[in-house]
């Protein structure tokens, strides 16, 4: 094993930033082989590093980015989940569009399918929605549309190189680790972030990342179903910075009728058409209510609204008057013109 991996695998003490620095340097120097990478990833997945080790990881990666991100964009919220949990329609992407249709400034980061049947990027490809290619491009999209789906440029290149070295072993084998850190890897200067956690309680390392100094104000959401989105059919808990929580009782803000089966995805062949139907609010009361709940969370987290009931009502109106679906179709048209705005 390469000596750079020893302190990261040993775990007798928290990994420091210089330990991660040594890993990235060995990666740059071509000093790591496939066995080294698989051993590292297997260790990280078998037992998640503690909070300080993960903070050191992010600090180390941040120092290797081409340039520091600008000051946070006011009133802008990123929605990104940990993946995993029961399979549902891509609720985070739909709620991002719905919230943006009500006037919330939304950034959506995400990835291709790892644990889900269709990841957010897979869905956007099927729909023909453009991803942004730089922070300037992202700012352009926010100014023109109120929403931006960011491309892979926001993620550290080191992780892509690890994936290449690990091939042909797919990265989904290591999904437990990647799902935990993934929502915090995107260098997007948002003011707030809503991250659904596919567990009944956020693991301690995730709580540590959620209050990382210099990071956005981050909400972690959980529910008894273990879904990484708010669900209308069950109670939900929002874990706020500082340790406070807010419980949204089933039926409190939206109807609680239905079951998880009503939120299930359809086959990949029909996913684009079904997603459009979801954005009309006519794909069934449970899906409609779940979308309203998640869009309202983005409105409140971003500071766009401070009243949950008002935010829920506005989301329902944006489904009924076609604003959410219209925003999607407008983005698709923009892509057909070359994907650039401004």
Image: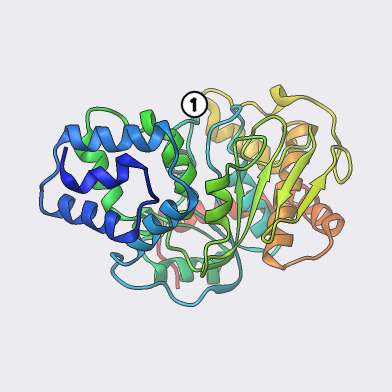
Q: Is residue 263 visible?
A: yes
The quadrant in which the C terminus is found is: bottom left
| Left or right: 253, with 123 as reference point | right
Residue beneath label 1, please?
268
Which x, y percent locates residue 201? 66, 39
Image quadrant in which you'd find residue 94: top right
- Nearer to the camera, 142 or 156: 156
Which x, y percent locates residue 267? 53, 22
| SS type, badge 1 | helix
Q: Residue at x 46, y 55 (%)?
A: 52
Q: How is the image coloured?
A: rainbow
Q: Is residue 74 placed above or below 3 in the rendered structure?
A: below
Q: Is residue 330 visible?
A: no
Q: Residue furthest left?
A: 30
Q: Residue furthest right?
A: 252
Q: Residue at x 23, y 51 (%)?
A: 23
| Left or right: 251, with 118 as reference point | right
The quadrant in which the N terminus is found is: top left
- Nearer to the camera, 14 or 95: 14
Q: Is residue 102 placed above or below 96 in the rendered structure?
A: below
Image quadrant in which you'd find residue 76: bottom right
């Amino acid at each position: 094993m390469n000596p750079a991996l020893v302190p990261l695998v040993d775990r007798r003490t928290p990994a420091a930033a210089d330990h991660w620095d040594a890993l990235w340097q060995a990666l740059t120097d071509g000093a790591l082989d496939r066995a080294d990478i698989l051993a590292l990833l297997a260790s990280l997945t078998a037992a998640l590093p503690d909070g300080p080790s993960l903070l050191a990881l992010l600090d180390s990666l941040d120092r290797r980015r081409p340039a520091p991100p600008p000051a946070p964009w006011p009133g802008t919220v990123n929605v990104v989940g940990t993946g995993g949990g029961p399979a549902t329609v891509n609720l985070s992407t739909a709620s991002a569009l719905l919230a943006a249709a009500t006037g919330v400034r939304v950034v959506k980061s995400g990835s291709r399918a790892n644990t889900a049947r269709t990841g957010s990027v897979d869905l956007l490809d099927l729909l023909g929605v453009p991803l942004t290619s730089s922070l300037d491009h992202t700012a352009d999209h926010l100014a023109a549309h109120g929403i931006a789906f960011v491309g892979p440029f926001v993620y550290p290149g080191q992780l892509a190189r690890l994936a290449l070295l690990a091939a042909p072993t797919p990265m989904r084998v290591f999904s437990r680790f990647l799902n935990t850190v993934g929502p915090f890897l995107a260098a997007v200067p948002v003011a707030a972030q809503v991250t659904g956690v596919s567990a009944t309680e956020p693991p301690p390392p995730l709580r540590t990342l959620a209050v990382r100094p210099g990071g956005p104000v981050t909400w972690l959401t959980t529910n008894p179903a273990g879904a990484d989105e708010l669900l209308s059919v069950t109670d939900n808990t929002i874990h706020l910075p500082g340790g406070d929580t807010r419980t949204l009782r089933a039926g409190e803000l939206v109807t609680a009728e239905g079951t998880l089966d009503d939120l299930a995805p359809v086959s990949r062949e029909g996913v684009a058409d079904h997603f459009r139907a979801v954005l009309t609010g006519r794909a069934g009361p449970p899906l409609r209510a779940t979308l309203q709940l998640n869009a309202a969370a983005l409105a409140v987290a971003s500071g766009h609204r401070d009243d949950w009931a008002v935010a829920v009502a506005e989301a329902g109106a944006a489904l009924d008057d076609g604003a959410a679906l219209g925003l999607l179709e407008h983005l698709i048209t923009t892509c057909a013109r070359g994907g650039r705005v401004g």
